[in-house]
Image (tube, rainbow, N blue to C red):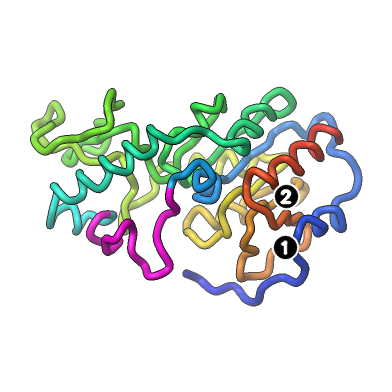
Amino acid sequence: MPEKGSTPSGSGTAVIFCYFSGSIPMNQKRLVVLTGAGVSAESGIRTFRDSNGLWEGHDIMEVASPGGWRKNQALVLDFYNQRRKQAQDCQPNDAHYALARLERHFEVQIITQNVDDLHERAGSSNVLHLHGELSKAQSSLDPSLVYTLDHWEIKEGTKCEKGSQLRPFIVWFGEAVPMMEPAISLTSKADVFLVLGTSMQVYPAASLIDFVPKAARKFLIDPQVPDFQLPREVKVIQEKATVGMRILEDLLVSS
């Protein structure tokens, strides 16, 4: 991961009140939200990988890379089948619902690094998935052929119309992020930009903050403050997603 300098001084929810002054003008209604694993974690979905670099006991490159797919399709299919089943058994949490409620007051666009559908199930209308979606499959021959699954399992031998094995609709390591350009376009139009449940360590998603308009209000909610210097105008709520969203929802709606 790129190193960007030292950890910013100051932490905790008090930071937001030190830096925030004035209300958000009524015409500043475009709220763009970048969400990460911390949001889904509170619904019981395990975060991306353990501190030892393993993901559910697997080397990350075995289950999340084109090379891993070529080496052992059965392993990769089973891995994502289990992730898919787990996600279907989980429910949206208060942070998901808070974002959905904000649509009453803002034009909310969610850009998520998460591959579950908890934002949609909570009622959010506009969700862009940067890294793919567990609920879909794609052709391993033609990436433009994408299918919505009606169950949790992709089996070996399940093929697209061109005869190739279906694979998870997930952006793996070493693959391009095709939704990055649309995400940049949305971010560049934000009046308010929120980073929720991510410590900004995963690229290229973390670079979206560089495209936020200078005049936009900027907030970050995560227990872990990024290990690089944030711009001073970013208001930090150092809390887990559900707690931080209660604070921010009150602030945004009351202002």
Q: Give the answer, above or below, for where 137 lies relative to 216.
A: above
User: Magenta includes 47?
Assistant: yes
Query: Looking at the image, is mark 2 or mark 1 earlier in the sequence?
Result: 2
* Residue furthest right as drawn: 22
Query: Badge 2, how many Cα within 10 Å: few under 14, some, many 20+?
Result: many
The residue shown at (73%, 56%) is 236
What amino acid type is highlighted by mark number 2? Lys
Q: Quadrant of residue 14?
A: bottom right
Q: Position of residue 138 (x, y in %)?
A: 25, 35
Residue linked to disc 1: 231
User: Is 96 left, or right, of 162 in this rendering?
Assistant: right
Q: Position of residue 118 (x, y in %)?
A: 48, 34
The residue shown at (75%, 46%) is 216
Q: Give the answer, above or below, for where 12 lies relative to 170.
A: below
User: Is 145 left, or right, of 131 in this rendering?
Assistant: left
What amino acid type is highlighted by mark number 1? Pro
The residue shown at (81%, 40%) is 251
User: Is 129 left, or right, of 194 in this rendering?
Assistant: left
What's drawn in magenta, residue-wise? 46-63
Q: Give the answer, above or below, for where 12 lies relative to 186.
A: below
SS type, badge 1: loop
SS type, badge 2: strand
Nearest the camera: 130 or 80?
80
User: Is 67 left, or right, of 105 in this rendering?
Assistant: left
Q: Position of residue 92 (x, y in %)?
A: 52, 33
The quadrant in which the C terminus is found is top right
Nearest the camera: 74 or 26?
74
Residue linked to disc 2: 218
* Residues at marks 2 and 1 touching, judged by CB atoms closer than 8 Å: yes
Q: Position of residue 184 (x, y in %)?
A: 55, 45
Query: Badge 1, how many Cα within 10 Å: few under 14, some, many 20+?
Result: few
